[in-house]
């Protein structure tokens, strides 16, 4: 069982970037990250408090506060001066695990730096805020170059770098496909606006040409497949002494408790499978998505040109001038008549996928009555047995929750350890394995339960598990309210 993400020290990790101050806090994190790794990097990984406070003050001045979402504490803070606000933002980032204090060995002063989790979170925020900062990965060519380097130097690092690049090929293609589909849906939804065609031009010149087109052309899996397979064959055909040396290096680089086969050969086979998956599915899907996107936008552009050439704008202008020349009731009557006649019509772009043409073919008759075959006796028996078997090996979460509450009440100390759940039947085993999920389902119980890890590994002879303490916190009153 993996340790929970929200373990002690990270219980409320994302709290600073929620609430009324979220935009200001995010900009402080981005500015701090840019100080370390951005264009203005000072080749350092820490910042003193005065500089960090200046960053917070600038964010407070430049970015909005969500006044509609403020609670009592936020309203009190908003009345303070900028220095106090900046100190509070720094305190929140420190208390919730984004930054930490440490002593600079060079100056012997206390400075701030990102925690490991804070640095990863800041990197994600940077990529979402400024996509242009993220360089495009050429993973097909990177795979080939890493394999060539491994063939020449037998450095296991190059082998596993090739494996990592091959895994990223399919993931990057999937991201590109999803983005193209999203762009196509947005353009169809905004077809009646000029922004649709402007967005198309911007996407084709700013994203498709430098990135997607490269993956379809220079970084195409089909183009480099033969060379990659040739390099893999050359590695596999090395003499016995070289292969033994490669195997020892690979096992030292990525140690495991035991090996069934060759670590080098398994890694090479996985690279081949990754390339095959990319060729058989994702490359075709990417080409199809690009084709659909260009077809849609080309159709909309054609419609836009036809509408513009019809002179609808000039005709509308002449009509407005004519109505403007009328006076009094005549103008009102003309506008009323125009509204009544034009209300059923709308001039705009139409997505071709919504158009259905009726073909001159005869319609097939559909039977209004469908004959349903009655199940045989053996089929009914099999269905009944299957239903009974499913029922016998299942237990509702609500029943598990009730068992936990009853056990805690019997203990008399408002606490139950997982190791205290006796496993005599299959239902007892389900209660043990699903106890944490049932404890978190607060809507199913009459008391509030919380689960806390104890960092102890237990075994009851049937299963091995991490020890947790399930405690009863707030007991509901007879009226259904929770006691504080």
Image (spheres, helix red, strand yellow):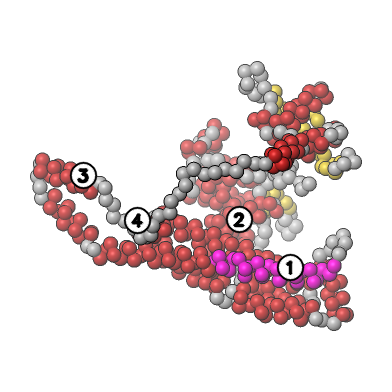
- Residue in the image at 23% along x and 59% along y: 313
Disc 3 designates what residue?
Answer: 340
Disc 2 designates what residue?
Answer: 124
Q: CA distance from mark 4 to mark 2?
A: 34 Å
Disc 1 designates what residue?
Answer: 270
Query: In what element is the residue under mark 4?
Result: loop
Q: Is residue 79 left or right of residue 469?
A: left
Disc 4 designates what residue?
Answer: 192
> Nearer the observer, disc 4 or disc 2?
4
- Labels 1 and 3: the sequence-earlier one: 1
> Nearer the observer, disc 2 or disc 1?
1
Mark 1: give few (<14), some (14-19) or many (20+) Cα within 10 Å.
some
User: Could you tell me what secondary structure mostly forms the magenta stretch?
Assistant: helix
**Image location of residue 202, percent across then percent down:** 43, 65
- Labels 4 and 2: the sequence-earlier one: 2
- Labels 2 and 1: the sequence-earlier one: 2
Quarter of the figure with residue 224: bottom right
Question: Considering depth in this image, is 373 or 73 the residue closer to the camera?
Answer: 373
**Image location of residue 93, percent across then percent down:** 63, 46
- Residue in the image at 25% along x and 65% along y: 309
Question: Considering depth in this image, is 262 or 23 the residue closer to the camera?
Answer: 262
Q: Which mark is residue 29?
A: none
Q: CA distance from mark 2 to mark 1?
A: 29 Å
- Labels 4 and 1: the sequence-earlier one: 4
Q: Which residues are magenta?
A: 261-286
Question: Considering depth in this image, is 264 or 457 the residue closer to the camera?
Answer: 264
């Amino acid at each position: 069982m993996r340790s929970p993400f929200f373990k002690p020290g990270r219980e409320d990790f994302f709290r600073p970037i929620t609430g009324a101050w979220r935009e200001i806090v995010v900009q402080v994190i981005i500015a701090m990250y840019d100080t370390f790794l951005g264009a203005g990097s000072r080749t350092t990984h820490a910042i003193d408090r005065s500089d960090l406070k200046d960053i917070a003050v600038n964010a407070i001045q430049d970015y909005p506060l969500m006044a509609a979402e403020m609670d009592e504490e936020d309203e009190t803070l908003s009345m303070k001066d900028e220095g106090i606000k900046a100190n509070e933002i720094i305190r929140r980032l420190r208390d919730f695990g984004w930054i930490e204090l440490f002593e600079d060995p060079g100056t012997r002063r206390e400075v701030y730096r990102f925690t490991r989790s804070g640095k990863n979170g800041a990197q994600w925020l940077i990529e979402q805020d400024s996509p242009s900062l993220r360089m495009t990965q050429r993973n097909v060519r990177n795979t080939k170059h890493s394999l060539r380097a491994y063939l020449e130097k037998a450095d296991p690092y190059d082998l596993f770098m090739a494996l990592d690049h091959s895994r990223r090929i399919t993931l990057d293609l999937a991201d590109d496909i999803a983005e193209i589909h999203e762009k196509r849906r947005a353009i169809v939804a905004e077809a009646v606006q000029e922004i649709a065609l402007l967005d198309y031009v911007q996407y084709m010149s700013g994203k498709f040409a430098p990135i997607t087109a490269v993956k379809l052309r220079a970084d195409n899996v089909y183009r480099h497949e033969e060379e990659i397979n040739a390099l893999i064959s050359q590695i596999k055909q090395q003499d016995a002494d070289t292969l033994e040396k490669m195997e020892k290096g690979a096992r030292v680089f990525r140690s495991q408790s035991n090996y069934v086969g060759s670590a080098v050969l398994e890694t090479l086979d996985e690279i081949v499978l990754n390339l095959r998956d990319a060729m058989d599915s994702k490359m075709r899907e990417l080409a199809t998505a690009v084709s659909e996107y260009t077809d849609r936008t080309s159709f909309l552009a054609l419609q836009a040109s036809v509408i513009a050439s019809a002179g609808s704008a000039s005709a509308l202008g002449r009509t407005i001038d004519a109505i403007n020349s009328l006076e009094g009731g005549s103008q009102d009557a003309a506008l009323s008549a125009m509204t009544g006649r034009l209300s059923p019509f709308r001039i705009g772009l139409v997505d071709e996928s919504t158009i259905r043409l009726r073909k001159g073919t005869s319609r097939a008759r559909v039977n209004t009555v469908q004959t349903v075959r009655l199940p045989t006796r053996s089929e009914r028996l099999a269905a009944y047995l299957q239903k009974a078997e499913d029922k016998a090996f299942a237990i509702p979460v609500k029943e598990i929750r009730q068992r936990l509450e009853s056990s805690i009440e019997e203990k008399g100390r408002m606490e139950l350890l997982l190791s205290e759940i006796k496993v005599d039947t299959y239902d007892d085993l389900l209660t043990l394995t699903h106890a944490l999920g049932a404890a978190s389902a607060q809507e199913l119980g009459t008391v509030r339960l919380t689960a806390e890890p104890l960092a102890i590994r237990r075994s009851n002879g049937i299963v091995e598990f991490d020890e947790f303490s399930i405690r009863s916190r707030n007991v509901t009153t007879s009226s259904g309210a929770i006691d504080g």
